[in-house]
Image (cartoon, grey):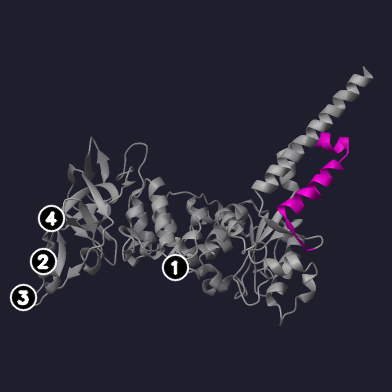
Amino acid sequence: MESRTQLELESAVRLKRNQLLDALGRHVFNDLPAHLIQISDMKLLSRTDLWEDLRAYIHGLSSADLLALRSPKEDAQARVKYAIFSHRWGAHEPSYQQLSRNQRWMDDATPTNSPGLLKLLRFCDKVRVYGCPYAWSDTCCIDKSSSAELEEAIRAMYRWYRDAEVCIVHLAATDNLADFEHEPWFTRGWTLQELLAPKRITFYNKEWASIFGNAVCPAESRNDKEDWRVLGTITKVTGIPAGDLRHFRPGCERVSEKMRWASQRGTTRAEDVAYALLGIFDITIPISYGEGQWAFHRLMEGIAQRSSEPGFFAWAGDASPYSLAYPCSPASYGMPVLDAQTVTGLRLTGSVFEEVGDQSYSITKLGLQVKLLLLPVRWIQQAQGLGSYTLSFAEGIFLETSPSPTLSQAYYEIFKPEQCVLGVVNYTRVTGDRGTLRVGERYFGFLLMPSGRSGYVKARTDQVLVWRCMEGVTKDLENVCLLNTLSPYGRDITT
């Protein structure tokens, strides 16, 4: 009997050890960054290095310790907690090669010769306070000479920031909370996901002190996403609601709003405008530096395939160089008339009771196929001779966009835009293929010019056209193809 009990105990221990090894292996090779700094000795470890250390540790655990484990997955994650760094790149940042070749890189950190190394050391000092055995920084924990590792890092970066124990932010131009309005960190493309993804974040000023001076709570328990002073200030600076700052959910919903958050941010490389948004929209596209604006066009195609909200079309300004049906950048969603207050008054999503707009628009070889409610427009000449023409609508439509789109007389006479129609995007769907515009509600859309028999060209306007209905309208919907083809009609109509 005793022998049987011993065998059962050994079997249970062996099972626990194998479960923990399996959980740790999957976590290390699938969830963690490719390289981490080990805080105890400041060495740069690969996933394989980390796995070997952890495997040796597990094999050294006693039977009692193994049997006391309740969840191998949770224990595996707790063993490899890491803090993650967010900052603006400066001069002489440390590289992967520098840290991997010199295990005593800390000795080279001086304020004058190596400000980047010194910044990394200060970050690691903070990591110790939070009790994290590992740390990650985008400067030195990515082997950028490996295209495969760089591509993985870009695709997985949102997830790495989300899964980190804490995100430590260094604001190099800030003394206190009042300086957030002028802090460049809030203007960079990559830092948007670094702000939204982490569950826990702490801000440090240029002297690596708390932005509150003497912090109210100990550093190891701080989370600035739970401080309403911080949230209120960031919302004022970025326009991002406090709820999203605390509990952001990535995906292809609320496209126009998320793009507006990114519209005032910049990146050094043109491709990074798109790559920095992959995690926010939960989109995967191949990484290919050198493709320029094509990267953002591919991102928009990916969003169009998954989005079902009319807000996708709430953009104005320059179209993509590759298609008039898509915007050229996030700035197209940040046009002045479509600010946060305007968006709040527009119906951009439906409900379980009614459908708003076409939720099944799709990509074709010719462009974007979408069902719109089309309204006639007319052009009113403002003066005799060489006067301009101003866009006008039928009775019962009050245009809120100001000033109204205008055309020069020369343009009008050459291109004859009398066939322009207004495509309403956020109508309410009623029975069959019919849509309705309700009295008093606000709608948005764009000007369309017929282009042969194949479809319409979206005319360029400097602002999203927004109007209010004074009379109800119900009519059949039209299946419209917004063409990719470049056309002068898509370039010359300006507000």
Residue that carries the numbered disc 2 in the rendered image? 380
Residue name at image x 57 percent, y 55 percent: 158
Element at label 3: loop
| Above/below status of 72 relative to 33 | above
Which residue is at the front of the view, 410 or 85?
A: 410
The quadrant holding residue 420 is bottom left
> Is any part of residue 473 visible from this angle?
yes
Which is more N-terminal, label 3 or label 4? 3
Indicate which label's residue lies in the foreground, 4 or 1.
1
Query: Could you tell me residue 485's position as x and y percent?
Result: 26, 58
In space, the residues marked 4 and 1 are separated at their CA atoms by 37 Å
Residue name at image x 76 percent, y 53 percent: 49
In space, the residues marked 2 and 4 are separated at their CA atoms by 14 Å
Which residue is at the front of the view, 82 or 102?
A: 102
Query: Could you tell me residue 143's position as x and y percent?
Result: 65, 62
Which segment is the magenta one? Answer: 42-69
Quadrant placement of the C terminus: bottom left
In space, the residues marked 1 and 2 are separated at their CA atoms by 35 Å
Query: Could you tell me residue 139's position as x and y percent?
Result: 64, 67
Is 389 left or right of 183, judged from the image as shown?
left
Which is more N-terminal, label 4 or label 2? 2
Which is more N-terminal, label 1 or label 4? 1
* Amino acid on which the number 3 mark rests in the picture: Gln
Residue name at image x 36 percent, y 56 percent: 343
Residue that carries the numbered disc 4 in the rendered image? 395
* Amino acid on which the number 4 mark rests in the picture: Glu
Is 457 left or right of 292, judged from the image as shown?
left
In space, the residues marked 2 and 3 are separated at their CA atoms by 11 Å
Magenta segment: does it hold 125? no
Residue that carries the numbered disc 3 in the rendered image? 384
